Image: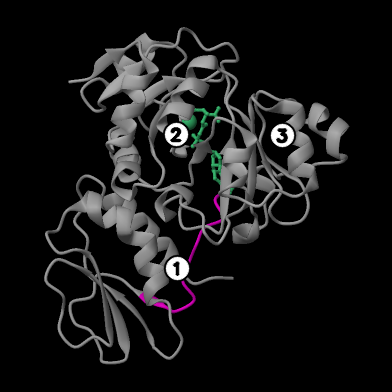
Amino acid sequence: MTILLDDPADAAALLRAGELVAFATETVYGLGADARNGRAVAGIFEAKGRPHFNPLICHFPDAEAAWAEVRPDERARKLAAAFWPGPLTLVLPRRADCRVDLLAGAGLDTLAVRVPGHPGALELLRLAGTPVAAPSANRSGRVSPTTTAHVLEELSGRIAAVLEGGDCEVGVESTVLDLAAGGAALLRPGGVPVEAIEAVIGPVGRALPISAAPEPTLRSPGLMLSHYAPSLPLRLDAVEVAPDEALLAFGSPLPGAAQVYQLSETRDLREAAARLFSGLRALDRPGLRGIAAMPIPGEGLGPAIRDRLDRAAAPRG
Ligand code: TXA
Ligand code: MG
């Protein structure tokens, strides 16, 4: 059952306990989870019924809290001073000691961060004392909710609680700006107009629309996803494993691998999702021929895990 809460302290306690809580921001309602907790983050994808893992935005009560997890450059500091709290998301390099679980960032070395311009959200984030990963609080493929009633229509029974926060003022998602690659690229238009950003940091590149994009090189999630892939070749649905291969196990491991990373001994798909990116990174070591992944079932979070493995296994150009 999903409960309605008025007190941000109750919502913060649920988040800290690994539960999913929807909350209002100035843009749309977010579906929040403790971003340090991989199982909680996996729960977001499960609740949304999303068939793939995309990187999520992490929310913070102030810029200092964000800078504890990512490395801002001068432009990021200026933009934060100009637009936070507010509907601007910055993609920046993760710090080496970043506490955000790899699943929240879809395994990437970068992280999207923002300080939302809604007093209830800020209070919740302060009290939670942890980065909060939150995509829009809708089922996959449906429009983003801007009222508590919309959230309940979408997710009632699938999440622990909704923190009442009134109607969202902006109604469209935050602008997503990539500052991690050296330049400045608009990944998603949103609540802060790009002209306002350019007035602070100068010219911003616009990502190409998908139809015009040169195949898999384009770095533009929201339009097209740049994704983490191991450098070793990946073999799917393995039923046996060679002595010079690493094994990504799900359930009883196949015998004979050079190295084994267990996604979930008990074949729990949420646990497997939470451990997927750590597993790929742990096994991606020189000296081996490749990684063999055991079959993943097709229900629940299974398709999202398989989608990610498929992409990692696809030949790269
Ligand atoms: O207004 C908003 O931004 C709402 C509210 C709840 O804050 N949140 C939201 O989150 O829209 P989400 O997860 O649905 O959108 C995340 C966007 C996607 O387009 C994603 O691809 C991009 O940000 N993104 C996240 N992390 C990224 C990264 N490391 N690199 C590039 N793009 C990233
Ligand atoms: Mg959305």
Find out whether the residues at labels 2 and 1 contact each other: C-beta distance under 8 Å. Answer: no
**In terms of secondary structure, what is the magenta stretch mainly?**
loop
Q: Is the CB of mark 2 within 8 Å of ligand 1?
A: yes
Q: CA distance from mark 2 to mark 3?
A: 19 Å
Measuring 39% from the left and 88% from the top, which residue is drawn there?
Answer: 288
Q: Which residue is mark 1?
A: 314
Mark 3: secondary structure: helix
Ligand 1 located in image quadrant: top right
Q: CA distance from mark 3 to mark 1?
A: 38 Å
**Which circle's residue, 3 or 1, is located before the other in the chain?**
3
Name the quarter where the C terminus is drawn.
bottom right
Mark 2: secondary structure: loop
Q: Which residue is mark 3?
A: 80
**Which circle's residue, 2 or 3, is located before the other in the chain?**
3
Q: Which residue is mark 2?
A: 134
The amino acid pointed to by label 2 is Ala
Question: Is residue 75 rendered to the left or right of residue 85?
Answer: right
Q: CA distance from mark 2 to mark 1?
A: 29 Å
